[in-house]
Image (cartoon, helix red, strand yellow):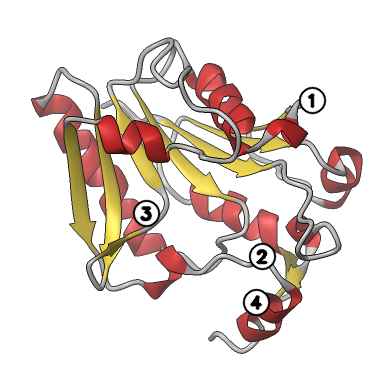
Amino acid sequence: MHQGCAVILAAGTASRMGSAKQLLTLYGCPMLEQVIRLALSIDFSQVVAVIGHEEDRIQQSIHVADSRFRWVVNPHYQSGQSTSFRMGIEQALPNHRSVTVFLGDQPFIKHETVHRLWKRGQESLRELRVPFAIQPMYLEKPGHPVLFGNVYQGQFDCIEGDQGARSVLAAMEQRFFLPVDDPGIHVDIDTPEDFEQALHIS
């Protein structure tokens, strides 16, 4: 079985939040730690969190005792999310055929959603030899995390700035949507108002 790698993008400056949102406490736990633990609850063979802004403070505040997990520091994080995305993919290659990309500010995604995405990825890897992407979809709108299958070196070199994987997804021939009952795939926390609302999500 091909288990794949999870990459969590969490290097940004959180300029709209005004503080390191990775360390905002939700339910007694830093938000980024919740995303890391979600990824570790799935059978990924490796989980990488790409950090940059306030990297020392984040590593001192979040302790993960799992041999599959490691931090990767992106020194170029101010050049946009694409630099973290490419760095995460590079860490996954050449040992993994699939990479599932999480955002560090989306702590409300259900375990069931990620497990179903991972399972669908396993099936697609057995059936396909070409690159593909699978996105969860809630109310006809795709969200995160995104699973990329049959990844190869240089596949994501074209992305730049803050566009993340959008341009790659748009150009991908094999792109699948997995309907889920999970509004959390759309909930990211960018502003103090987002955080206040998040405190009331059960």
Q: Residues within 10 Å of mark 2 (few under 14, many from 20)?
A: some
Give the labeled residue for mark 2.
190
- Verify CB contact (< 8 Å) between mark 4 and mark 2: yes
Quote the CA–CA distance across marks 3 and 4: 23 Å
Which amino acid does the dot numbered 2 rest on?
Answer: Asp
Q: Residue at x 32, y 37 (%)?
A: 169
Q: Residue 28, position in %: x, y?
A: 75, 73
Which amino acid does the dot numbered 3 rest on?
Answer: Val
Which amino acid does the dot numbered 4 rest on?
Answer: Asp
User: Does residue 143 sit above or below 47 in this rendering?
Assistant: below
Q: Residues within 10 Å of mark 3 (few under 14, many from 20)?
A: many
Q: Residue 55, position in %: x, y?
A: 84, 39
Report the side of 199 relative to 52 (left or right).
left
Report the side of 42 relative to 78 (left or right).
left
Give the labeled residue for mark 3.
114
| Marked residue nearer the N-terminal end (1 or 3) | 1
Give the labeled residue for mark 4.
194
Image quarter in which the N terminus is found: top left
Element on which disc 1 rests: loop
Quarter of the image holding residue 195?
Answer: bottom right
